[in-house]
Amino acid sequence: MTDALFNPGFTDKLIPLSLDTQYFYEELNAIKNFNIKKSEFKIALPKLVQLVDRHVGFYIGCMLWGAYLKTLGNEKIINNPFLEKEYDEESALSEINFALDFIKKLDKDSKYYIGKPFVYDYKKIKILEIYKTFIIQNKSFVATDTVDKIVLVNSLENLSNDEILTIKNKIDEVILSGKLEELLIYCDKILTV
């Protein structure tokens, strides 16, 4: 019997989005010339979108990892940093709420600086909302000491063993490469109800 890791290595590959974007906005706000600000924002927008995509990939990975862990029966979860902590929903959802608000901010800023709306992929926004549900239903994993206590969302309960194995292999690959955005290919696995 093998213990199951709470975190297979995702968090080592990610800086919170709130911190990742802070430096850019500090630099942008320091620029006095509006035309230079417009130019800087236009150059940075694709990079900011990539940051959001990385975080959506991370959230997909977390939910898929939960689906993988559920296949392990009732094994003990090791290294769950939230176990036996007090559940604080606001704190648990702060980064995901930041991501959702940041997408709205990108649209507002895009209209302001470059005169065009920014439209983020609806499927990815839906993933963020589903992840919120995942965290809420699991109460941020404060009482999750074994894998059988993980509550899965949407169609994750219906994945076949072959699908889980393929996903597990992709997660292992992504953890090595650090390219969390590659997990975006699994959006539809989560969105299907």
Image (tube, rainbow, N blue to C red):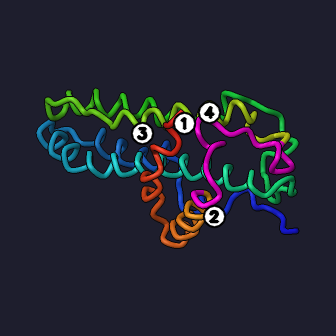
Q: Which residue is mark 1?
A: 96
Spatial CA span between label 2 and label 4: 20 Å
Q: Which residue is mark 3?
A: 124
Residue 139: quadrant of the picture: top right
Q: Which residue is mark 4?
A: 93
In what element is the residue under mark 1? helix
Q: Earlier in the sequence, mark 1 or mark 2?
A: 2
In what element is the residue under mark 4? loop
**Nearer-the-camera pick, 133 or 44:** 133
Image location (x, y in percent) of residue 126: 46, 32
Three-letter amino acid code of the residue under disc 4: Leu
**Nearer-the-camera pick, 36 or 182:** 182
* Label 4 vs label 3, nearer the camera: 3
Are the residues flagged by discs 1 and 4 in contact, CB closer than 8 Å? yes
Spatial CA span between label 4 and label 3: 17 Å
Q: Earlier in the sequence, mark 2 or mark 4?
A: 2
* Label 2 vs label 3, nearer the camera: 3
